[in-house]
Image: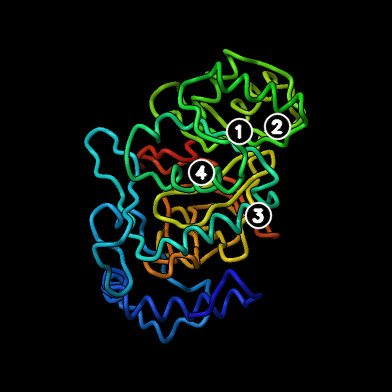
Amino acid sequence: MTSVFDTPFDFESVALESFRFQAENNAVYHNYLKLLNINPLKIDSISKIPFLPISFFKTKKVVTGNIDSSAIVFSSSRTTGTEPSLHYVSDISLYEKAFTQAFNHFYTSTDQWCILALLPSYLEREGSSLVYMCQHLVEKTGKKNSGFYLNDFRKLADTITVNEQRGIKTLLIGVSFALLDFAHAYPMPLKNTVIMETGGMKGRRKEMIRQELHAILKEAFLLNVIHSEYGMTELLSQAYSSGNGIFHCPPWMKVFVRDSNDPLSESIPGQGGINIIDLANINSCCFISTQDIGRVYDDGTFEILGRFENAEVRGCNLLIE
């Protein structure tokens, strides 16, 4: 398969190549297409590619080809009475390339940053792809104060204060409820620190719209913008927003919308259910139909507007606008 990380490539041709490969070698996706009576050879445009419902990751082993016992399994958080999604990753180097190069693409090299992670709910369970990503990014910074701060707000505040005084470029990435708790306990003016929320109240606080969350954080830290990360267990790639909830994808990822009333509709412009092509997912499924509702703009950027009714609450990006 064509590498999507090292050289320029034509997205449509690689996506179609990946589609035909997975249609033949991914048993779950193959059977899904068969039930839909779709002939993969007749799919000649990415707008016509059928997307696999994300719920399949809860009930099926969504893998392309064979997978052995050495595979890493990422799992979503489990809410009461629900099964977690499981993502079997046979080649962890693909994930590491995806998150490293995406971060470098949007934020420059990790060694230019001190990365502070405030992800208490994720650290309290196993199998979090977000924790795996942050751990590797933290290590790549080479900074002694980079790391996970769990619930130690005092130590986190002291670290940020020192970094601010020394002019050290700092990224504080955190789950929404923890960032709100920290903002309440230690408000401070920030000049050299970027705050990035990953979404998610995890039942710790009431859900709120993104604008409300960002307004509270901006006021507490005297910042003009709050950044955001959009990712999920079932993907290997992340999109990032540098403000106002408008997300940008790395070159190997694209977001589309489908008709909210027709899950099998071809991709359409404007607003609807969110479909994602993640070409890093070559060993699982690159074509995922999510339970998010959003809007995609002409330049390829997108925003998340909410979730479909009865969709399970998810750890990342639960903010409703």
* Number of numbered callouts drawn: 4
Mark closer to the chain start, 2 or 1: 1
Q: Which mark is residue 104?
A: 3
Residue annotated with mark 4: 134
Q: Does any portion of residue 44 appear in the rendered image?
A: yes
**The C terminus lies in which quarter of the figure?**
top right
Amino acid type, callout 4: Cys
Residue at mark 1 to residue at mark 3: CA–CA distance: 16 Å
Residue annotated with mark 2: 193
Amino acid type, callout 2: Thr
Mark 3 nearby-residue class (10 Å; few <14, some 14–19, many ≥20)? some
Amino acid type, callout 1: Leu
Amino acid type, callout 3: Asn
Where residue 235 appears, x then y in whole percent?
A: 44, 56
Above/below status of 319 relative to 289: above
Q: Which mark is residue 185?
A: none
Q: Residue at 57% of width from left, 23% of height from top? A: 156
Residue at mark 3 to residue at mark 4: CA–CA distance: 14 Å
The residue closer to the viewer here, 268 or 63, is 63
The residue closer to the viewer here, 145 or 275, is 145
Residue annotated with mark 1: 172
- SS category of the residue bearing label 2: strand
Residue at mark 4 to residue at mark 1: CA–CA distance: 11 Å
Q: Are marks 2 and 3 in contact (CB under 8 Å)?
A: no
Mark closer to the chain start, 4 or 1: 4
The residue closer to the viewer here, 221 or 290, is 221
Q: Residue at 40% of width from left, 80% of height from top? A: 21
